[in-house]
Image: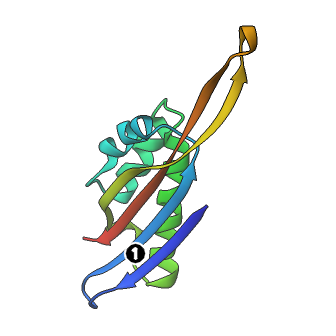
Amino acid sequence: MIKNENLEKLDSDKEAKVLAQHIRMSVFKARRVIDQIRGRSYEETLMILELMPYRASYPILKLVYSAAANASNNMGLNETDLFISKAEVNEGAIMKKLRPRARGRSYMIKKTTCHIKIVLKEK
């Protein structure tokens, strides 16, 4: 689920926020990708994410596209002037299910989720 949060603090300090919740991915795998793009420009981020060999880069790429579209359509910002000012990954809910094992026992299978938040600002 993607939530778009657009805030206008001042005329000179506009930022576009996007938040994706319950992404079915480990927090550590998503942070490995987020750490590479934090503080970079929008165009450089797109190149990095498209060439990264990790599965975590695709949902993050979709989020960056969404945040840039919000910034250009809703706030009138130019996409070439945007950079990633804040990018964070937090833990989400853990889905649990039981797997049957030998002798009537069962083991817990934990499927982790994460929340990804990206903020774009103008240079």
Q: Amino acid at mark 1?
A: Asn
Image coordinates of residue 114 in percent, x first then y, are 48, 48
**Colour scheme shown:** rainbow
Q: SS class of the residue under badge 1?
A: loop
The residue at the far front in this view is 104
Residue at image x 39%, y 40%? 33
Residue at image x 24%, y 86%? 12
Residue 118 placement, left or right of 70: left
Image coordinates of residue 36 in percent, x first then y, are 31, 41
Q: Is residue 118 above or below residue 46?
A: below
The residue at the far top in this view is 103
Q: Is residue 86 above or below residue 123?
A: above
Depth check: give the residue in front, 102 or 113: 102
Q: Is residue 71 above or below residue 114?
A: below
Residue at image x 40%, y 79%? 77
Q: Dot 1, crowdedness within 10 Å: few (<14), some or many (≥20)?
A: few
Residue 17 placement, left or right of 106: left
Image coordinates of residue 91 in percent, x first then y, are 43, 48
Depth check: give the residue in front, 39 or 30: 30
Depth check: give the residue in front, 71 or 30: 30
Q: Quadrant of the C terminus?
A: bottom left
Residue 73 placement, left or right of 9: right
Q: How many marks?
A: 1
Residue at image x 74%, y 8%? 103
Q: Which residue is mark 1?
A: 78
Q: Quadrant of the N terminus?
A: bottom right
Depth check: give the residue in front, 54 or 76: 54
Image coordinates of residue 101 in percent, x first then y, are 71, 14
Q: In terms of image quadrants, where is residue 121?
A: bottom left
